[in-house]
Image (tube, rainbow, N blue to C red):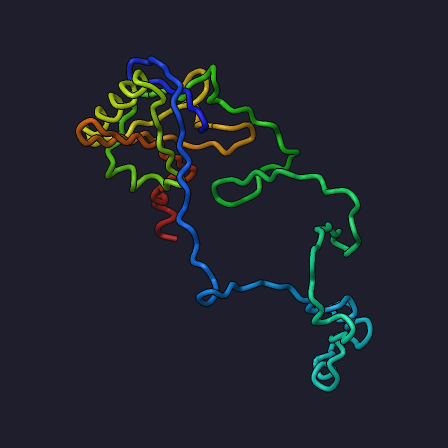
Amino acid sequence: MRKLHITNEKQRDATVGMLTLKPDPTPHMGLPGVDLEYRRYIGAAESGLHDSLVQALGEDYAQALVDGDPEIDMEYVGQHIGRSDRIYLSHGGKVLHHAPEELEVIINPDGSERERRAPKDVLANVTEEIPARWTGKRIKKRDVVRRFVLTRSVPLQHVDGLTYDFLYGMAKDLHDSDEMMLMGGGESGKQPLILIPNGSPYRGLLEGRVDGDRYILLLHLSNMELKLPAEGEKKA
């Protein structure tokens, strides 16, 4: 079980569990008592690719395809493909013997390119020493669903009696107010949550539900906020 260091409204901290929900199994493909087996086959040899056909037949080779099927190499096409390895090709079609360097492209909100740079290592800002902080900023549940796209929800679980009281108190507070709490990362608690090194930054929204002595405390993660377009964009 993964752990999460978190604070409550009084800025008291505890380390609790993060549950991983297993998705329902996908439908089983096949007939009763019969399994389907997927196989891959060669669809074209190098001589049947566009550049090779242009070199051999010229740009207008449509009629040649109809008359003689020159794109089909009977020696290779249709053969079953077993184990295969991934290779990288340059824009000229040559095999690269080293993986290409990654390039990070920074995009402005309007979709234009702002910067290109080598990827930078990003440290997690929620660790054993730095907790996810209760910011005090409450948002009504009905407003959350209109403002944020929730991409993932992580149930938090107590690991002993003390953390049960800790999490139950947070869940009951949020349940009674029908609100969610914005959680912050970093020393100041004002940053988005980065749970793992080089992970994506997320807004964290804490939701609580209680039923008697039972509780559910969910940490919702969002990396997309819904905003109305400006007046000029509406008219356009």
x, y percentage for residue 115? 60, 37
x, y percentage for residue 176? 18, 28
x, y percentage for residue 151? 40, 41
> Is 198 rendered above or below residue 12?
below
Residue visible at 24% across and 39% down? Answer: 142
Q: Does residue 126 appear left or right of residue 179 in this picture?
A: right
Observer-nearest of 62 and 49? 49
- How many marks the image carries: the answer is 0
Q: Quadrant of residue 137?
A: top left
Observer-nearest of 148 and 169? 169
User: Which quarter shows the N terminus?
Assistant: top left
x, y percentage for residue 58? 79, 76
> Is 164 rendered above or below residue 78?
above
Tell which residue pokes out farthest to the bottom in this image: 67
Observer-nearest of 184 and 106? 184
Q: Does residue 180 appear left or right of residue 89 in this picture?
A: left
Residue visible at 51% across and 63% down? Answer: 35
Residue visible at 41% across and 20% down? Answer: 5
Residue visible at 60% across and 27% down? Answer: 121
Tell which residue pokes out farthest to the right in this image: 56
Observer-nearest of 68 and 13? 13
> Is 177 rendered above or below residue 57?
above
Q: Quadrant of residue 157?
A: top left
